[in-house]
Image: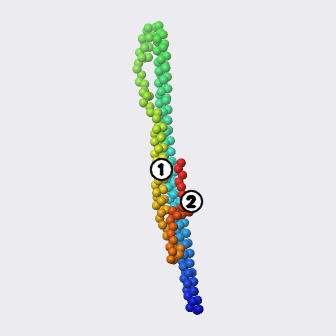
């Protein structure tokens, strides 16, 4: 009986040692997981900020190009109005000359009215800027799709990696991030 009691005490001591090791390992594991989560948060925050910076740059680029285009259009509108006013003035002068009975006045005025005026050719103006903006939107949509595909593929690689943690000396147990995702209801990315 004394031998049996000694054996039980040894087993108890072994179990207590194993229990302490398991508690220590479990605490280390929790700290490690917390570190991974914090680093993941930091990396995703940097990624989001990088995307926001690119969004701001693109917004600035589009606005500055649009402002430049509107400014050019305003200049052209001003020139067109000036030319239309000049053409109307000459048309009025021609009307007056047509009805003039004074031949001397007609000859003196005819040269200034009939003088060739260098008018700009506004027929070459391109009004199809919506096509360019459509291309920008198409490119952005493609970029979003490529990023989403890349992120999903990389997430699959991460989620299929085994994370080993032995809970009992004789029965190692492992789980993958994929198992975690399944048990938590999954992760999805929302397309806008």
Contact between labelled residues 1 and 2, with CB atoms less than 8 Å apart: no
Q: Which element type, helix, strand or loop, lies under badge 1?
A: helix
| 119 relative to 192, above or below | above
Residue at (57% x, 86% y) in the render: 8
Q: Residues within 10 Å of mark 2 (few under 14, many from 20)?
A: few
Task: Tell which circle, 2 or 1, labels the residue nearer the N-terminal end.
Answer: 1
Asked whether residue 51 appears in the rendered view, the answer is yes
| 97 relative to 183, above or below | above
Q: Nearer the viewer, mark 2 or mark 1?
A: 2
Residue occupied by mark 1: 145
Residue occupied by mark 2: 185
Residue at (48% x, 56% y) in the render: 152
Relative horizontal placement of residue 87, taking residue 4 as reference (left or right)? left
Rendered location of residue 157, percent (x, y)? 46, 61
Asked whether residue 68 appears in the rendered view, the answer is no
Q: Which element type, helix, strand or loop, lies under badge 2?
A: loop
| 75 relative to 149, above or below | above
Which residue is at the front of the view, 26 or 109?
A: 26
Rendered location of residue 87, percent (x, y)? 47, 21
Rendered location of residue 192, percent (x, y)? 53, 48
Residue at (50% x, 73% y) in the render: 172
């Amino acid at each position: 009986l004394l031998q049996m009691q000694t054996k039980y005490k040894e087993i108890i001591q072994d179990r207590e040692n194993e229990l302490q090791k398991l508690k220590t390992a479990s605490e280390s594991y929790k700290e490690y997981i917390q570190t991974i989560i914090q680093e993941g948060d930091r990396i995703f925050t940097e990624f989001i900020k990088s995307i926001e910076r690119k969004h701001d740059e693109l917004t600035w680029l589009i606005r500055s190009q649009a402002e430049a285009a509107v400014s050019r259009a305003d200049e052209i509108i001003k020139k067109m109005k000036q030319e239309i006013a000049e053409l109307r003035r000459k048309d009025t002068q021609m009307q007056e000359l047509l009805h003039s009975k004074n031949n001397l006045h007609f000859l003196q005025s005819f040269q200034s009215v009939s003088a060739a005026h260098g008018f700009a050719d506004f027929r070459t103006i391109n009004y199809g800027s919506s096509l360019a903006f459509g291309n920008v939107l198409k490119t952005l949509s493609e970029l979003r799709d490529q990023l989403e595909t890349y992120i999903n593929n990389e997430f699959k690689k991460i989620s299929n990696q085994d994370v080993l943690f032995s809970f009992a000396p004789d029965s190692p147990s492992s789980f993958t991030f994929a198992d975690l995702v399944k048990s938590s209801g999954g992760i999805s990315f929302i397309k806008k």
